[in-house]
Every structure is written in C-alpha cells, then in structure tokens.
Image (spheres, coloured by chain):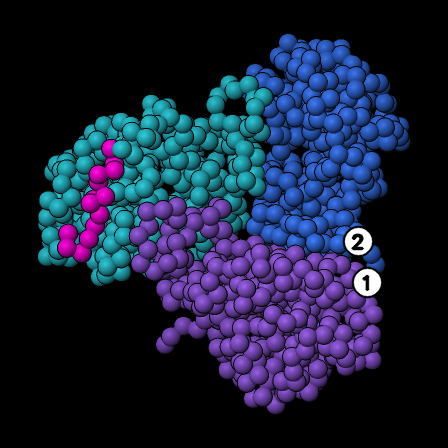
Chain colours: A cyan, B purple, C blue
C-alpha cells in the first residue's frame, strides 16, 4: 500500500475531491468529532503564514491530534534543498533528512515553500514540496508551493458551492489585481482549477504579460471541459471581465515571463494600478450580486477597496473559515483512524 | 447577546472582578478541571513574552483546550493597523482581516501590542487591541497594550489578597525605578487600579516628570474612593515613599510627557539611577515585612537588588504563578462551556 | 524529596539508565500509553533545533501532555545568564526568574544552550543549563549544552542495542569529520559515554589538535572500564580507525584547545577535508557491515557521502526516531504520574 500525498488538487480524482468536499460540509455542520487521536502533523514553514498555520493547528486539535510547527532558518535549521549538494556552505540540514526524520515523529507532514531563485523553469517544478513527499514515508500536504495551493482550492470549491448552490454553468471570473510585489501564481491557478472542477464557466482577466503558466492554463481548460464547464476566454479588460460574474476571485500575481527579473516586472506593472476591485466595477456582476473572493492576505485599497471588502458581496471571511473545515476533512482522510 | 472582551480591569464591574478572583482561587486549589474542551485561543504577539505566552498555553491545555501562537512580522504576516490604509507598502495583512479570520478559527483571541509611534495622543487610544475587539466576533483578551495589562492586574489583586489577607486600608506603594529604556505605563496603571479595587491606600512614588497619564491617575483615585480606600498621595522621594508600606510594587516606566522623544527622556532619567529597591530601603516598610512585587521581567540590580529579589519579602514568583491561575479563571469565564 | 534532573548521562546510575532504556524499548513497542495527562514541559531554546523540538512536542502529546516552546531573544525576552549582573544593558530577563517562573507553569523544563563566549574554561561549566536546574523547582532536561547532549546519548545507546544486539566487546568508532564550522563537543563526548556504558570497545579517531576535553576523555575511559569494556585507543588516521568497526559514529567538532580563536581553528582544519566517510572507507568495517550513526543535522558530502547516508549501513534515521522513544521514557520517568 502506498501513501497518499495532497500536493495538487488535480492529483486526486474527481470522486475523491467530491468525497472530501462532502466530508468538509459534514465537519462544518458539526457531525464529526475525533478521528485524529494520537496523530501528529509536522508543519514546515519556509515562508510566513497566518490562516494555514492557525487553521491546521486548530484542525488537528479539534479532532484530538496535535500540530508541530517548524520554521527552518529561524527556530529550526536552515534547509539545503539541492540533491547531491556538497554542503560546505551556510545550510545546515538537507531536506532529505528533514523529510525522513519528520516522517518518523509525525503521521503526516505539511510543507510551505514559495518559489525561490530566478529561473521559472526550475521554480515551476515545485521541487521542495515534491522532494519532501518523495523522502517522507508519511503523507505530505502542500501548504502552498510555487505552483499550487490545494488546501486553498478545496476551501474555494467549498465556498463556491455554499454561496452559489448549483455551480455548473455559473460564471467564475478570476481577475488580476495590482500589488506592490510580484506574487506567485499558485493561488490563481489553484482557484481556477477548483472552479473548473465544479463545472463553472471560467473567465481569466489579466493585463497582457500576466498569462498564467501555459501548462496551467491548458490544465484549467481541460478540467473545465471534462467537468462539463466551458473555458470562456481570457480578457485583458478589468471592467468587461466582470460582466455577469457569479463569483469574482481577485488575486495579484507576478509575470511568469519576467520571473526572476524584478526590475522589468516592476516596470511592466507600473501602469496597472487601475486593476483594483471597486464598488462601481462590482455593479457589473450578475444582478450586482456576484460574490467577491480572495485567499487573503489582501492589500486593502490596492487589490480591493474597503467598501467592497466590508460590503455584502464579500465572502472572504467565510472562505478563510472554510480552510479550517476543508482541512479537517483532508486530515481525517489522510491521517485519520478508520471510524 | 453580545460577546465580552477583557481589555481593561475597569471595564468589568467590581462584582465580576470579584467572581473572577474567587474562581481563580478555586482553580489554584485544584477544585476545577476541564471546561475548555475543544476550545481554541489564538494569541497574536506583536511584542515578546515569556510569562503571558507560557501561562496562557498552559492554562488552555490544563482545561482541555489549545492555544495557537502567532507572531506577525516573524512567522506570520506583518500587520497594517491603520483604518482606511492604502496598503501599497510593506505591511501585508490588515488587522481587520486578521481579527475576522481568527475569530472563525478560535473561540477567543489574545492580543499583545505595546505602544507604537511617537505620539502619546495616538498611542494612548490602544487602537490595536480595541480594533481587534471591534472586528473579531469572539472575545478578545488584552495581553498588554499601551495603557493596560489587565491579566497582570488580576494576578496582582490575587497576590495582594493571598499575602495580605484583608486588603482594605492596607498601604500599597507603587514605586518608580530606573531602567535603561523608557517602558510603557500599562503595568503601573493596571497594578494601581487593581490595588484601588481592593480598597487599599495608594501611594505612587516617582520622580518629577514621571506622572502617569492624568486620566489614569484620576481613574485610580476614583476607583480607590469607590472601594472605600484612600488615594493617599504622590511622592517624589524613593525613601519616604516606602514608610509603612504593606506592599511595594516596583516598576519602571517612561515619561508620558516626553513620549516619542527618546533623547530628552534619556537625559531626564539620567540622574535617577538611585531609584532602586535596596535591602536598606525595604527596612522602612511596615515591620520591615512589606511584600515586594514586580510584574517581571525585572532588571536585577537596576530596578531591584539581588538581595531583595532573593530574600524573604519578594513575592514576584508567586505573583507570576498567579498569572496562570487568574487566566485559567478568565478563560473559563470567557470561553468555557457552562458546567 | 529532591527533584531529579537529566543534565548528563553519567549523573544517572547505570541501573537507572538501564531502566530508561528498557522503558524506551517498551514505549517503542507501543506497550505504554498515557502517563503525562495534564503535564506541561517548558522548553527554552537558546539555539535552533529540529529533532529535539519536534520529538519532545510529539512525546508530550502522545502521552497526554503538552510542550510549550520559548525562544529567548526571538519571541521571548533575551536572557541574562551571569549571576550578580547589573542588568543595565540589552538583556531583559535574568535566567533566575525564567527558571523560577517556568517551574511554576510547567512540570519540567528543557534547556538548549550551546557554548557561548571565547573561553573554554568558562563554557565547559555548562552554567546555563546547570543554573536553570539550580533555580527551577521542577526537573530540568538538558536539550544540549556545551558539554553534553544526554537525550542524544540515550537514543544512541538504544540504537546500538537494537542494531548490534549484545554490545559488550563490540567496536564503537567515533570518527571526526571535517565541517565548515567549529562545532561543540557535546555530541561526541555523550555518544562515546553512551557506548562506554554499553561495555563496547571505544576507538576515537581524530586529527591531531582535535582531542576532546581531557576530563571527558578520562570519564569515557573510566566508564568503559567499569562496564567491562575497553578503551582501545586514540587514532589519528581516518582509514585505520574504521578497521573492524561494528558501529561508526561520524561527527565533526571544533578544537577545544583553539576554542574562541576561530581564525586559528579554521587554519588548523583547512587541510582536513579528507576526513569524510566514503563508501570505500566503509568497506573496512567488520564484514563491510558496520552501522553508520550521526546525530543529525549532517553535512552531506562533507561529513558523510550521499552513497553512505542513502545506503544500507546508515541507521541515522532510526537513530533520530529513537530520540522520540527515549524521550518518552525519560518524560514518563521524570514527570509521569505513578501508574
């Protein structure tokens, strides 16, 4: 029997995702208690976190388990991640040993590793998360890598269902927003994949130069078609994009083409501050009632205006809450004792 | 039904504080177990902590619950705290979202936020702790703000009672001490308020220029009078102050008038190193047996001499222990299931 | 009744260590559950950790307890460790108060404090760990000091037994390795002491100038003799050392003689990169089957080659796993309720 990891939503079959979502709904309704007694989750954060850390700690605790948090380079040893490295520099411990050892102390591992380095060809491999999975004998959960944030995707799918009811054919608009930094594409890709799984019509609005990784775009298209949805199109106008939207997912991300070239990227994005979700733009959603989603943390009045975030269309806090329930379901599925 | 916060001792009625103190005494005697099963406390530390962190973690655990610790700017995202900010700078997440989201993962929040900025008119509003309370749908506990440290105050009241028995009319001397840094006034104000609640005679000894915030002084006076105590007076002599003291509370704090002007403040304090609790000064307390209190951390041989801290009058470790018991009572009251 | 600390393996009698090892084996076989309900361990890390932190947190949890982690100078106050210090500098809290207060919140303390300062005469006293033990009213566990790492020693002894069966008379080779930094001697001294306790023949291989502290060498010799083992000899050749080894313990450490003189130490070690465990060297162990041990973190391809660490002789991951079981036994012994 091989262990199961949760590195990307698309690694799991649609039946399996469907089961997770149904279990998450039952968890949220309070129908499930226990199931993780004496279970330990070891979380390795190479990058900061609020929701992921707090919700996984709470999730483990609520079912009788415990989460250990490690921060390499802070309280824990800095990690070498290159296979075959001659470790005579600053990095103290190799990922291989961290993965193997934590697999002995814990029943599952969670890893957060944002993209590193200047080369997208390298970063897009998600090597850190995948190498942890390769070397750990216990299930590994991706807590956000360069390419994917599958726990967010799960919460996003759960939220879309809760808010929209039947999702098939409804319009999901992923819209780019300006941000002072070039952020990873893990969340936008994962959110669009989640919506595609739900059979929604997918619109991606972004300025020229902000295409997602082509393989991700192709995958979103393929999954949407499999699920009976439609990959409507890619739009470069922040107003036109929102017309008729049932759900607006706002997110900033950096240019994949200019990955690792921050000055050129900053120059390209300099004229794009108008890509921001304002109350007036919100009025072009379906019946002015399109829900507004964001993975958080959000730059207020930069990505989304205060009036939108604090208004009735915003579901960002419910969406964040669903991280907890979706992850409780995931943990029960991956680490839980058969009940 | 509205939620209850614990932001300042004076926000709670004297009956409510009395109940907390009695519950804390029962907790300390080992009469209460459980009560926080499946409850989560999310603690947000914008500043360091030893006692608060360790005692709250232990308190939650001892009654079946769990505390999650977040450190914005370290393992967690840096927080923007200004309402309406256009977040295009370094701060990644707004307090509003942190408060709302943590309110979904946890049953209560604890926030530590020392004074920030150069303007006392602003800092004295305790905006960070109060905004967390405003935006969280769950109870918020002040883990020390610019103005108040109510958990310390609760432990102080508990300690005064344990050590002095009947407190009414006994003499409580809050005495300033020199320190290399200008510290907040949260602890001295809160301690004096606690002693006032207990009907004690309050003496505040400090050098000229080290008056507490006038509103706090007025509040201490008013509460002392209501409780049947007497606000004796304010003294500027470190020797005279201790005469007849039943309890000596040593604490350094910065000049409120020179808040945000560190060079002038340092110049003013430069001649005041003599404000230190020595064994000889201790002899002028009532029967040489006045108890010595301090919230810790204490600068040994700067605020208080080794011989005093390690001698029989010092109750600082019992006082620190009472943080645990007082907070267990508080958590049971705020988050506990009705038993 | 006085409390028991666990500061060095040699502080405990051989019967007591034997009991611990037998309890650890039972724990590993899953024969013991519970025993630490409502027990709190406060861990103070002055230096980084992966295994120690994760395994102690897991150990406490698995038996119903909870570990609190504090990092002075990061999330917690910086510690002054000098007795009698006039604390007018940067350090905020004295070790004395930290030890006393944590002894009130917790049922046991764990302290990690690597060597500090430039003087081995001072560092070798292990003052920080010993002062915590002196001032805490609860048991103190050494999580690695300048001189000792007794929890590692316990796991090492357990691993040697598991892998070698009868250990008496088998050959244990502690071999120095090159490393970019001058590391403490706590692990090599503790490992050799553990092997000596098991009645093994001890070989220590190191280049000239890398002798252990003479007192430690004498102690290893004495314990080996008491246990019926033999202190074979000290060798300065990395090839000859391995001949006939049943267990090879690879570890780098800094020159005790040049402690606090990093430039001279670096010059002395510059020619010694050949001290590295390679597959070909491994072939001179007994039947080519000598087990390879290391406390981790290990510098891959600097201390030990990938082919060795990933090959069949390496037991480093089992050894790390045994930290968990050995510490569960230790915690049950020190903090556990009588069952």
Quarter of the image for residue B132 reads bottom left
The foreground one among A337 and B276 is B276
Residue B80 place in picture, x, y as percent: 39, 54
Asked whether the residues under marks 1 and 2 belong to the same chain, the reply is: no
Q: In the structure shown, which secondary structural element does the residue marked by tag 1 occupy?
A: helix
Residue under the point 21% across and 38% down: A271
Tally of numbered discs: 2
Q: Which mark is residue B307?
A: 1
Check if residue C312 falls in the magenta segment: no
Q: In the structure shown, which secondary structural element does the residue marked by tag 2 occupy?
A: loop
The foreground one among A120 and A7 is A120
Could you tell me if residue A131 is visible in this image? yes
| Chain ID, mark 2 | C
Are dots 1 and 2 in contact, CB under 8 Å? no
| Chain ID, mark 1 | B
Q: Which mark is residue B257?
A: none
Residue under the point 51% across and 18% down: A84
Residue A264 place in picture, x, y as percent: 29, 29
Residue under the point 72% across and 38% down: C116
Disc 2 designates what residue? C84
Residue under the point 75% across and 54% down: C86
Circle 1 packing at 10 Å, graded few (<14), some (14-19), many (20+), is some
Quarter of the image for residue B241 reads bottom right
Q: Disc 1 versus disc 2: distance between alpha carbons?
A: 10 Å
The foreground one among C269 and C276 is C269
In the rendered image, which quarter contains the N terminus of chain B? bottom left
Segment colored magenta: A268-281
> What secondary structure is the stretch in magenta mostly built from?
loop
Q: Is residue B289 above or below residue C155?
A: below
Residue C208 place in picture, x, y as percent: 79, 16
Quarter of the image for residue B194 reads bottom right
Residue A238 place in picture, x, y as percent: 15, 44
């Amino acid at each position: 029997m091989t262990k199961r990891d949760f590195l990307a939503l698309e690694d799991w079959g649609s039946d399996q995702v469907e089961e997770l979502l149904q279990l998450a709904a039952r968890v949220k309704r309070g129908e499930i208690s226990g199931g993780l007694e004496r279970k330990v989750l070891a979380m390795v954060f190479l990058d900061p976190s609020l929701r992921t850390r707090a919700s996984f700690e709470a999730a483990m605790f609520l079912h009788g388990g415990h989460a250990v948090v490690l921060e390499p380079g802070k309280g824990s040893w800095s990690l070498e991640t290159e296979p075959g490295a001659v470790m005579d520099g600053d990095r103290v411990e190799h990922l291989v040993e961290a993965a193997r050892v934590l697999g002995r102390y814990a029943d599952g591992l969670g890893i957060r590793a944002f993209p590193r380095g200047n080369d997208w060809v390298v970063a897009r491999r998600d090597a850190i998360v995948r190498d942890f999975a390769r070397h750990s004998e216990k299930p590994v959960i991706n807590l956000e890598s360069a390419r994917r944030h599958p726990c967010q995707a799960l919460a996003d799918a759960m939220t879309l269902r809760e808010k929209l009811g039947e999702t098939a054919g409804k319009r999901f608009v992923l819209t780019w927003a300006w941000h002072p930094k070039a952020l990873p594409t893990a969340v936008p890709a994962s959110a669009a994949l989640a919506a595609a799984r739900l059979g929604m019509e997918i619109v991606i609005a972004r300025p020229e130069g902000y295409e997602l990784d082509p393989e991700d775009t192709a995958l979103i298209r393929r999954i949407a078609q499999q699920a009976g949805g439609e990959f409507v199109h890619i739009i470069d106008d922040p107003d036109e994009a929102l017309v008729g939207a049932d759900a607006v997912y706002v997110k900033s991300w950096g240019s994949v083409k200019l990955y690792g070239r921050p000055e050129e990227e900053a120059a390209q994005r300099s004229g794009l501050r108008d890509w921001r979700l304002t109350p007036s733009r919100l009025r072009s959603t379906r019946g002015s009632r399109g829900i507004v989603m964001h993975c958080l943390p959000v730059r207020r009045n930069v990505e989304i205006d205060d009036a939108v975030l604090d208004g009735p269309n915003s579901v960002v806090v419910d969406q964040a809450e669903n991280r907890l329930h979706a992850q409780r379901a995931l943990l029960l599925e991956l680490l839980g004792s058969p009940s």
